[in-house]
Amino acid sequence: MEQPRGASSSPLSCGTTSEERPVAVPWGCELSTSARSCVVEEGDDFLEHLVLLKTISLGPDAQDELHVVAVDSKNTCGERKPVPIASLRLSVLPMISLKGLEFVPPVTFVLQCGAGPVYLHGQHLILEDDGRSEASEDVLSEEDAGDEEDAGTARDAE
């Protein structure tokens, strides 16, 4: 069977190494009356970090009261305001699954009301440094420019 142009049977054909792939680490925290907030700090490794929130759930010993979870992170204007992201009640909605809720650390998750325990689960992604990828792009563009010069020289020789 013939493959379409540009298709490859190898998932690693784009030239990435294991060092350049994102590292996903399971992440979670518990919010309750004893710990009303959880802070996720950015690493001091000069890499890009991302927190992907997957689920928020009440613990089995949570009371049947309203539990509101908010996130406190910088918005695009640089302001910090807690924004509610989940309202849970044991008898109505004890758990929610989130799809694509991403935060750039530092980010703080806060239990605004309720006694908990409320469990947050997700992944902490460590991505390739932007400066390193920009340097790779510069090298590639220099190689492309060199190829264009070689082609122009070949045309002039004819």
Image (spheres, rainbow, N blue to C red):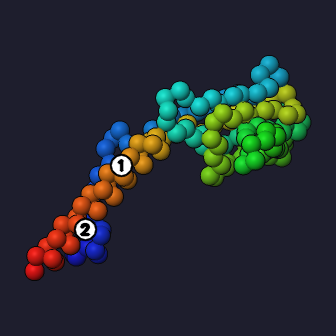
Q: Residue at x 55, y 29 (%)?
A: 43
| Image position of 7 (left or right of 95) | left
For marks 2 and 1, give the one nearer the viewer: 2
Q: Is residue 32 visible?
A: no
Q: Amino acid at mark 2?
A: Glu
Q: Is residue 156 above or below residue 143?
A: below
User: For the image shown, how many numbered marks are present on the structure?
Assistant: 2
Q: Residue furthest top?
A: 34
Badge 2: residue crowd in 10 Å (few <14, some 14–19, many ≥20): few
CA gap, disc 2 and disc 1: 19 Å
Give SS at disc 1.
helix
Q: Residue at x 83, y 22 (%)?
A: 33
Badge 1: residue crowd in 10 Å (few <14, some 14–19, many ≥20): few
Q: Residue at x 47, y 44 (%)?
A: 130
**Picture quadrant of residue 13:** bottom left
Give SS at disc 2.
helix
Checking the image for residue 136, the label placed there is 1
Q: Is residue 56 visible?
A: yes
Q: Residue at x 24, y 61 (%)?
A: 146
* Quadrant location, the C terminus: bottom left
Q: Which percent across, then down, holds residue 21?
A: 40, 44
Q: Amino acid at mark 1?
A: Ser
Q: Which percent across, then down, holds residue 89?
A: 84, 41
Q: Residue furthest bottom?
A: 158
Of residues 121 and 85, the one nearer the viewer is 85
* Quadrant location, the N terminus: bottom left
Q: Which percent across, then down, holds residue 28?
A: 62, 32
Q: Which percent across, then down, holds residue 47?
A: 49, 36
Q: Residue furthest front?
A: 156
| Image position of 108 (left or right of 10) | right
Tag 2 residue = 148
